[in-house]
Image (tube, grey):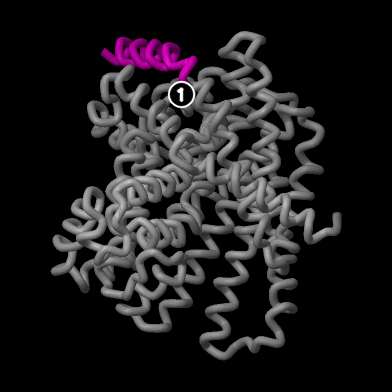
């Protein structure tokens, strides 16, 4: 078997697994666990939503330093948001609308509504069952609430999660994000004739090296430096993107009611909105739910790894940050992206794949070509913050599988992956990383389902104490 035949076999096998992981069976499991948790907690995300937002915002503006080996609660949520609020919020939403029609946005909202409760449970469990490692740092996440919350018969689930996590971080967390950064910068430079096609490869190598150095400098500084960077970068990139998006919506404010009508109508009758190109309600639901899950990571368990580092003694209180995180990621930022595309009037070719270029076209329709500079900055911030967040996730998975001694070597290797990521055509790597990303949800969902009684007990004790 030659190399091309081997790659063909790998691609075929991965495509089959990927179709299942991000297809309806797996999504039913993720949505099913979210619905189960919603019912067990008495619709917590609706009943206590004002309290969750009030608690989260109150702790965001509270000054203070974290103890050694931990982050402040705000730094923890920023690190988690750094990994979730990424290029998927720009490219992924555009792709969901193009393939599933505007109705995909409605199902994205539904998945986020259930995902709020799932993320709450994940974060609460991560803080409750976390440990302190040999370096004096707080460590937690699905592998630790499986290890400390379930019997020894289920320990293999923790190992499975960690292995899939390590395999996913190099692609999902780094290489593809570095590629996004150089693509955004090149597009801006080419549009202003500051770069020619012959110099692109050299520019990519230089940019990849710079990204690797910056990533190494942040990650090797430990969780306190990661938290210090993300608490500044995430609010900046979110505010920049929100302001640009609101500008488009304000200019086209008269179209907003009609667009919301398309979203609701398209969820149940896609053909009426897409001109018959997308006629399947099932397809609209599938793309919307898949994009919602992939965006906010509720059900994957990854975000809880960052939250476990928070300097807090109240697992439930940190859990409310999980509700806030999903709300910001999917309900706010993904919805703004959808409105930019649908309100701006840019042509959407339904039934054909689309990505970030569709979202950027929506911005350019209002601001002109110069906005490519700002979109490049936003995408660079999104992608770089994702690299940092997933770097922490990978380090925690490696530490769980081996020991704290492997953290620094892992982070050096992880940082260097940015160079080939910036200079190569990734192709199959993205799809493989996406598959491993989804595979992490299997052991996590089993654990969250089995530990749901612990979540309910902690919730009852928390509010009994409050009252």
Q: Residue at x 78, y 49 (%)?
A: 412
Q: Quadrant of the C terminus?
A: top left
Q: Secondary structure at mark 1?
A: helix
Is 454 one of the magenta-colored residues? yes
Is 410 one of the magenta-colored residues? no
From the viewer's perspective, is 454 left or right of 380?
left
> At which x and y percent is residue 63?
43, 39
Prevailing secondary structure class for the magenta stretch in the rendered image: helix
Q: Residue at x 67, y 28 (%)?
A: 160
- Examine the image and state in which quarter residue 90 appears: bottom left
> At which x and y percent is residue 447?
53, 20
The residue segment tinted magenta is 449-467
Front in this rendered view, residue 145 or 310? 145
Front in this rendered view, residue 72 or 166? 166
Front in this rendered view, residue 403 or 275? 275
From the viewer's perspective, is 190 left or right of 235?
right
> At which x and y percent is residue 206?
73, 72
- Examine the image and state in which quarter residue 51 appears: top left
From the viewer's perspective, is 63 left or right of 439?
left
> At which x and y percent is residue 365?
32, 79
């Amino acid at each position: 078997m030659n190399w091309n035949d081997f790659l063909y076999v790998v691609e075929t096998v991965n495509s089959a697994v990927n179709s299942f992981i991000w297809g309806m069976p797996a999504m039913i499991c993720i949505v099913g666990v979210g619905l189960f948790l919603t019912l067990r907690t008495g619709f917590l995300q609706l009943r206590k939503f004002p309290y969750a937002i009030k608690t989260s915002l109150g702790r965001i503006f509270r000054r203070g330093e974290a103890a050694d080996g931990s982050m402040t609660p705000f730094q923890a949520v920023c690190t988690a948001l750094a990994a979730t609020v990424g290029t998927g919020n720009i490219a992924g939403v555009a792709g969901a609308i193009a393939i599933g029609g505007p109705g995909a946005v409605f199902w994205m909202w539904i998945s986020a509504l259930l995902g709020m409760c799932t993320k709450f449970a994940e974060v609460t469990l991560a803080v409750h069952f976390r440990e302190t490692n040999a370096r004096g740092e707080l460590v937690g996440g699905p592998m630790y609430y499986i290890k400390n919350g379930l019997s020894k018969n289920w320990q293999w689930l923790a190992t499975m999660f960690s292995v899939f996590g390590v395999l996913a971080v190099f692609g999902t967390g780094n290489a593809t994000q570095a590629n996004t950064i150089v693509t955004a910068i090149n597009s801006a430079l080419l549009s202003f004739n500051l770069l020619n096609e012959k110099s692109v490869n050299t520019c990519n190598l230089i940019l990849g090296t710079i990204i690797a150095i910056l990533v190494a400098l942040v990650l090797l500084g430990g969780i306190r430096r990661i938290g210090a960077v993300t608490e500044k970068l995430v609010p900046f990139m979110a505010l920049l993107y929100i302001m640009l998006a609101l500008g488009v919506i304000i200019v086209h404010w008269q179209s907003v009611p009609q667009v919301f009508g398309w979203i609701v109508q398209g969820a149940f009758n896609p053909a009426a909105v897409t001109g018959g190109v997308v006629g399947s309600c099932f397809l609209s639901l599938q793309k919307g739910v898949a994009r919602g899950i992939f965006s906010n990571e509720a059900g994957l368990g990854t975000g809880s790894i960052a939250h476990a580092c928070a300097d807090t003694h109240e697992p439930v209180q940190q859990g409310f940050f999980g509700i806030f995180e999903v709300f910001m990621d999917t309900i706010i930022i993904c919805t703004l992206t959808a409105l930019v595309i649908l309100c701006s009037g840019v042509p959407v070719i339904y039934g054909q794949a689309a990505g970030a270029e569709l979202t950027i076209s929506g911005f350019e329709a209002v601001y002109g070509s110069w906005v490519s500079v700002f979109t490049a900055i936003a995408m660079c911030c999104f992608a770089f913050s994702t690299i940092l967040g997933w770097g922490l996730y990978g380090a925690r998975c490696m530490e769980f599988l081996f020991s704290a001694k492997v953290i620094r070597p892992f982070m050096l290797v992880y940082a260097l992956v940015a160079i080939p990521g910036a200079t190569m055509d990734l192709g199959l790597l993205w799809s493989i990383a996406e598959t491993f990303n989804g595979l992490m949800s299997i052991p996590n969902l089993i654990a969250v389902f089995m530990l749901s009684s612990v979540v309910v007990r902690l919730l009852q004790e928390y509010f009994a104490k409050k009252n």
